[in-house]
Amino acid sequence: MSEPTLPQVVEAVAGRRSVRRFLAQPVPRQTVEAILTASSRAPSGTNSQPWHVHVVAGEARERLSRAVIAAASEGHKSEEYAYCPEPLPEPYLARRRKVGYDLYGLYRIERSDYAARKRAYIRNFEFFGAPVGLFFTMDRVLLHGSWLDMGMFMENVMVVARAHGLETCPQAAWCEYGPLVRSTLGIPPERILVSGMSLGFEDRTAPENTLKTERVPVPGFATFEGF
């Protein structure tokens, strides 16, 4: 097998985006295992490899989806951890609002239509139609370094999935119902749920999958010295 070219590597990373409508086409277990095997080459401090992944499909996926949709419909949140500070300061608040309004526009949802916005939110717990869900956990006793390790591992999963013709959507929304997710999947209490993720084949006809989020140009986030 030939080595990937620079353009292929760059496209695998730069072309990644969060897909919010998938085809029902199944994903074989061996494909998921191949993705996780390659992704486990992610770096981790002292090779600690803190990640643990719970993969659901079929009835297990449906059971979890039903449980969390019922809780979300009733507003029974129980957050696993605080994802960001509240109130969220600028410029982060403006960026969050921008991507939200852009997505609502593709959904054809008016900003004032809170019922439609809630329905769009609940689609998270339908895995946006993806046949496979992944739930990333690690031991609660671990600290900030291991969260960095988990992020690098998850990024590998999202990029490697593309090599198999698949796309993903990382979903912190599942963590708003962390205890319910853990109890439904039998995840022991000593593990914290870091994130969920949908995995499947992209529905290329879906307007919401045309969303291209903006990025700050390099001078806006990088400082160079000595060049």
Image: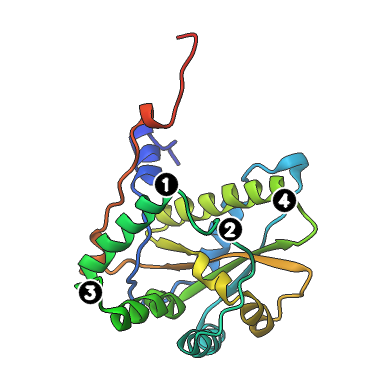
Q: Residue at x 56, y 59 (%)?
A: 83
CA gap between label 1 and label 3 equals 25 Å
Q: Are marks 2 and 3 in contact (CB under 8 Å)?
A: no
Q: Is residue 157 above or below residue 72?
A: above
Q: Residue at x 74, y 67 (%)?
A: 191
Q: Earlier in the sequence, mark 1 or mark 3?
A: 1
CA gap between label 4 and label 1 equals 34 Å
Q: Nearer the viewer, residue 152 or 108?
A: 108
Find disc 1 in the rendering and name its residue: 90
Say which mark, if any, is on residue 213: none
Find disc 2 in the rendering and name its residue: 36
Side of 35 where 23 appears, left or right: left
User: Could you tell me which secondary element the residue under label 3 belongs to?
Assistant: loop
Q: Is residue 128 visible?
A: yes
Residue 160 drawn at (x, y percent): 48, 52
Give neighbour class at mark 2: few <14, some 14-19, many 20+ (Cα, 10 Å). some
Quadrant in which residue 20 is drawn: bottom left
Find disc 3 in the rendering and name its residue: 109
Find disc 4 in the rendering and name its residue: 49
Residue 153 drawn at (x, y percent): 59, 51
Q: Earlier in the sequence, mark 4 or mark 2?
A: 2
Side of 154 where 184 appears, left or right: right
Label count reads 4
Q: In which quadrant will I find the N terminus?
A: top left
Q: Is residue 24 visible?
A: no
Q: In which quadrant will I find the C terminus?
A: top left
Which is in the foreground here, disc 2 or disc 3? 3
CA gap between label 4 and label 3 equals 42 Å
Q: Residue at x 28, y 69 (%)?
A: 203
Residue 187 drawn at (x, y percent): 71, 76
